[in-house]
Amino acid sequence: MHIFGLFFLMGSLLIQGPGEISSSDFYQLCEEQPGVVVFDVRPWAEFMESRIPDALYGGEKKVLLEKLTNLSDTTLILVYCEYGERSKAVLKILKQQGFKNTRHLKNGFEGWLREGFPVDSTSLEGFNEHY
C-alpha cells in the first residue's frame, strides 16, 4: 500500500510543477488567506482590461521589485500571467529576493477565465503601472 501512495504522489508532482496551483486552489487562497498578495505579471494593457480581483500589477521587473519592498519574506505571494509560463520566471525572481511562500497559477488567466472564476473589469483609466 505504501508503494501505491508513493507512485500517486510522484504522479501528481509530475502533473503539477513546483509552486504551481490550480485555479480553484488559487481562488481559495485569495478568499481565505489573510494578507495574501496577488501579482498580475501580464502586460499593462491586459491588466487594465481585466484582472483577478484585488491583483496588483507586476508585469515589469522594476515595478514588481518596488512593490516587494514593503512585504515580509514570509508573505504568501500568488502570481499569474496569461498562460502560466511568465509567472514561473517571476517565481524565480521572488525566490532570489528571499520570498519563501510563493505560488503561481497553473494555466494562467486563460485557465482562470475558462473555469469561470471572478474577474475585475473595472476601468483603470488614469492609473499607471504603479497602481
Image: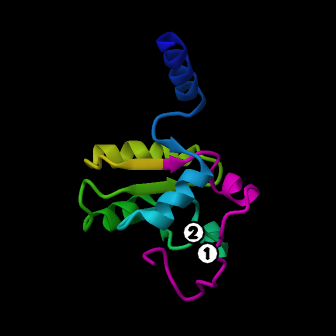
Tell me the amino acid under the disc marked 2: Trp
Identify which residue is drawn at 26% across, 54% down. 74
- Quarter of the image for residue 47 reads bottom right
Element carrying mark 2: helix
Horizontally, is 88 left or right of 46 in the view? Answer: left
Whole-percent x, y for residue 86 in the image: 54, 47
> Main structural element of the magenta stretch: helix, strand or loop?
loop
Whole-percent x, y for residue 115 in the image: 73, 56
Residue 7 - label? none
Whether 108 is drawn above or below 13: the answer is below
Q: Which residue is mark 1?
A: 48
Q: Is residue 41 something that shows in the picture?
A: no
Nearest the eye: 9 or 79: 9
Nearest the eye: 119 or 7: 7
Q: Is residue 123 magenta?
A: yes
Whole-percent x, y for residue 112 in the image: 67, 57
Between the residue at mark 2 and the residue at mark 1, the CA separation in whole angstroms equals: 6 Å
Whole-percent x, y for residue 65 in the image: 33, 60
Tell me the amino acid under the disc marked 1: Met
Q: Which residue is mark 2?
A: 44
Identify which residue is drawn at 39% across, 56% down. 77
Residues in magenta, as a range: 104-131
Nearest the eye: 64 or 73: 73
